[in-house]
Amino acid sequence: MDIYLLDIFPIILFFISFYGLITTSNIIKTIVFIMLMQTSVIMFWLGVGSRLGIVPPIIGDIAYLEYPDVIADPLPQALMLTAIIIGIAVTAVNITMLNSLFKRHTTVNWKSLQELVQGEESQYES
């Protein structure tokens, strides 16, 4: 398998998003970085599934049956369509949980939220 320039961009975007995910202390930025990671994976697999010179799997001409390597594989596109729907659902759940956390603790910072939760736990223990 050859590596094309369009394969490198999603890989770089994935690792930039991963770095941002592990270094941020803001919950909103965490959700954005998770969305960027999902998008980069989808971009990579759609790029793998569509190359120059590849024809769609809807065969109108019987001559393409002699050359099965020029017919695009529909599986990556179908899986990425499913991944898009799952990504939307995960993002919606993340935003709903963020809304609930913000209403309860009025912060979007991981560290201050952790301190607040530990303070509540120690209050219940005594």
Image (cartoon, rainbow, N blue to C red):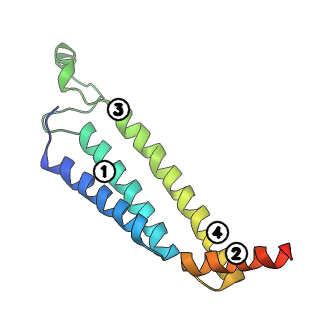
Where does the image place residue 16, in percent across and percent down from the top left?
30, 63
What residue do we see at 48% from left, 44% from top? 82
Residue marked by disc 4: 97
> How far is the residue under mark 3 from the one under mark 1?
15 Å
Residue marked by disc 2: 118
Using the image, determine if residue 10 lies above or below residue 106: above
Looking at marks 1 and 2 on the same chain, the residue that comes earlier in the sequence is marked by: 1
Using the image, determine if residue 17 lies above or below residue 99: above
Looking at marks 2 and 4 on the same chain, the residue that comes earlier in the sequence is marked by: 4
> How far is the residue under mark 2 from the one under mark 4?
19 Å
User: Residue flagged by tag 3: what amino acid is it?
Assistant: Pro
Residue marked by disc 1: 43
Which disc number belongs to residue 115? none
| Mark 3 Cα shell of 10 Å, populated few (<14), some (14-19), many (≥20) | few
Where does the image place residue 47, in percent across and percent down from the top left?
25, 44
What residue do we see at 43% from left, 39% from top? 79
Q: Furthest-top residue in view?
A: 66
User: Residue flagged by tag 1: what amino acid is it?
Assistant: Met
> How far is the residue under mark 1 from the one under mark 2?
40 Å
Residue marked by disc 3: 74
Specify the quadrant that holds the C terminus: bottom right
